[in-house]
Image (tube, rainbow, N blue to C red):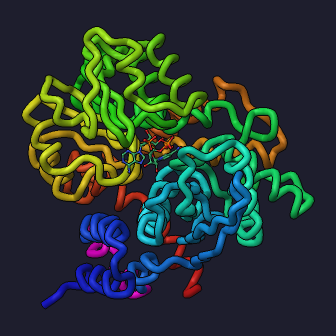
């Protein structure tokens, strides 16, 4: 007979056909909630699982805009407002050609639990468009962002839904969207986070996800009586999260030997030090160039591996931190990492590790930090930006960074302790899912059937 958890999952698959990333995220969470549901029969009675997998609201809209040649282009935009039990919907906006409901729903679903783990009052949501920013001019980017916000503005607000950046959306895009919102509403409010420092942004928000994931990985290493000093670290991606993960790991004494983009990987056995990182930041954030140029520029021992991810480079590795995109570390990658000595895998990206790879790593004694706990520093600092906007104050860099560090240490403690309490010591997946879920589930019960 199909059990309760499986029946909820099967209904999700039936009601959301062909949304495989959403199915994957739901399966991972539901499977690990078994002990929590057994301990709290009231959640079954209140149909919390059936309710939590159904977004409160989904908005899908046309985004028409005019390119530099005067041609009309049409994209699809969306915002999935998943759960507001513990605060206004909060989650990023992604601009990437692969965006469709399945991706935004998986991200929005994960966001519910991640935001709960931060300890801040934020619900879960996510949005995006199938727009490809690559190769677009500055004015095309601006027109697209404006067209996107021309519809989104009616669905968001500082007490309703506060979007932020994600893949393809950084401070520049947030600025163009903020400008349109302000004009339409005639209000200067904290409706978006990730803003520029001159107009309501928070210090350390840019660095927050990468710094946070590094603090989380440090705590994981501490449990194993280790630290980053002298460790060989493989990182994927070269965008916002990867850049500041490289920076913090290096500051803590680790040696980062890889970075990547969707075209390939660079392997730098001498390590991406502060000077090389400056080059990478300029290459990616100013010139919008490709990672191959890093290898061309530095030459020597640096190798460029086209169409490859870092995980199968085949040399010794202590810590792996996937920071690019979903499902970028599969079972073969996991096998290669274990063979080469990996001790900690800590996710900077959202769901970068496939389910079978996650299981394999955990079974082989690797400490595995799931994104919803490990990369929560970004949204946590967005939460701090919201607080500063509400107070109309700006905190110092030291204040924000100290709060971020405390939050990450707390998330680690909560997930670690929850895993033990529910019978899976050392399993951060179980710990993160149960700890995030309990907070939201209790709020949903308290607020009745809404
Ligand atoms: P960016 O757009 O700044 O960088 C994304 C990086 O990933 C780029 O190097 C990009 O390469 C690579 N990438 C994107 N799509 C693919 C793909 N399909 N295959 C291979 N590589 C790809 O995004 P972020 O750094 O902000 O986000 C990275 C990850 O971190 C995402 O999973 C995001 O959801 C997650 N995250 C981000 C947070 C934030 O605060 N920004 C917070 C929490 C999680 P290319 O340039 O070639 O596209």
Residue 361 versus residue 450: which sits nearer the camera? 361
Residue 376 place in picture, x, y as percent: 48, 46
Up/down of 24 relative to 169, above or below: below
Q: Is residue 316 left or right of residue 167?
A: left
- 299 in the magenta segment: no
- At 62% across and 51% down in the image, what residue appears? 164
Q: Quadrant of residue 344?
A: top left
- At 88% across and 57% down in the image, what residue appears? 183
Q: Is residue 153 left or right of residue 100?
A: right
In the current view of this chain or complex, which residue is farthest to the right? 186
- 37 in the magenta segment: yes
- At 23% across and 81% down in the image, what residue appears? 6
Up/down of 37 relative to 354, above or below: below
Residue 448 place in picture, x, y as percent: 57, 84
Predominant SS along the magenta part: helix
The quarter in which the N terminus is drawn is: bottom left
Q: Is residue 182 left or right of residue 219?
A: right
Residue 230 place in picture, x, y as percent: 27, 13
The quarter in which the C terminus is drawn is: bottom right
Residue 255 versus residue 17: which sits nearer the camera? 17
Q: Is residue 278 left or right of residue 293?
A: right
Which contiguous range is marked in magenta?
Answer: 35-46
Query: Number of labelled discs?
Result: 0
Q: Quadrant of residue 256?
A: top left
Question: Is residue 227 among the parts visible in the rendering?
Answer: no
Residue 280 versus residue 411: which sits nearer the camera? 280
Image quadrant, ligand 1: top left
Question: Is residue 320 among the parts visible in the rendering?
Answer: yes
Up/down of 200 relative to 179, above or below: above
- At 43% across and 64% down in the image, what residue appears? 103
Residue 93 versus residue 38: which sits nearer the camera? 93
């Amino acid at each position: 007979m199909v059990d309760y958890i499986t029946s909820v999952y099967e209904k999700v698959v039936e009601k959301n056909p062909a949304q495989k990333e959403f199915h994957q995220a739901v399966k991972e969470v539901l499977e690990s909630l078994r002990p929590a549901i057994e301990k709290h029969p009231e959640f079954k009675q209140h149909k919390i699982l059936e309710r939590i997998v159904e977004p409160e609201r989904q908005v899908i809209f046309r985004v028409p805009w005019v390119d530099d040649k005067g041609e009309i282009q049409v994209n699809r935009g969306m915002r999935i407002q998943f759960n507001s039990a513990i605060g206004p919907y909060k989650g990023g906006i992604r601009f990437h050609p692969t965006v469709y409901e399945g991706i935004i729903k998986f991200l929005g679903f994960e966001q519910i639990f991640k935001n709960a783990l931060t300890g801040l009052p934020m619900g879960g949501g996510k949005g995006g468009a199938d727009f490809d920013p690559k190769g677009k001019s500055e004015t095309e980017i601006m027109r697209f962002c404006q067209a996107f916000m021309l519809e989104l503005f009616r669905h968001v607000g500082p007490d309703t839904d506060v979007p932020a950046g994600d893949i393809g959306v950084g401070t520049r895009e947030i600025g163009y969207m903020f400008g349109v919102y302000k004009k339409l509403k005639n209000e200067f409010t904290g409706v978006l986070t990730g803003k520029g420092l001159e107009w309501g942004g928070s210090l350390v928000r840019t660095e927050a996800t990468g710094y946070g994931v590094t603090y989380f990985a440090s705590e994981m290493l501490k449990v194993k009586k280790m630290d980053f000093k002298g460790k060989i670290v493989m990182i994927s991606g070269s965008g916002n999260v990867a850049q500041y993960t490289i920076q913090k790991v290096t500051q803590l004494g680790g040696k980062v030997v890889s970075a990547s983009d969707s075209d390939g990987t660079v392997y730098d056995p001498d390590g991406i030090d502060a000077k090389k990182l400056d080059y990478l930041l300029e290459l990616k954030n100013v010139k919008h160039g490709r990672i191959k140029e890093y290898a061309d520029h530095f030459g020597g021992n640096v190798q460029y591996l086209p169409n490859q991810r870092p995980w199968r480079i085949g040399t010794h590795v202590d810590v792996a931190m996937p920071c690019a995109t979903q499902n970028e570390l599969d079972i073969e990658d996991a096998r290669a990492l274990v063979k080469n000595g990996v001790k900690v895998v800590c996710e900077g990206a959202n769901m970068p590790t496939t389910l079978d790879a996650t299981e394999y790593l955990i079974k082989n004694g690797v400490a595995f930090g799931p994104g919803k706990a490990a990369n929560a520093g970004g949204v946590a600092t967005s939460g701090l930006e919201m607080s500063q906007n509400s107070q109309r104050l700006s905190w110092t860099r030291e204040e924000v960074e100290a709060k971020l560090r405390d939050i990450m240490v707390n998330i680690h403690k909560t997930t670690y302790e929850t895993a033990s309490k529910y019978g899976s010591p050392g399993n951060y997946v179980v710990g993160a899912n149960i700890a995030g879920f309990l907070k939201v589930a209790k709020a949903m019960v308290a607020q009745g059937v809404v």
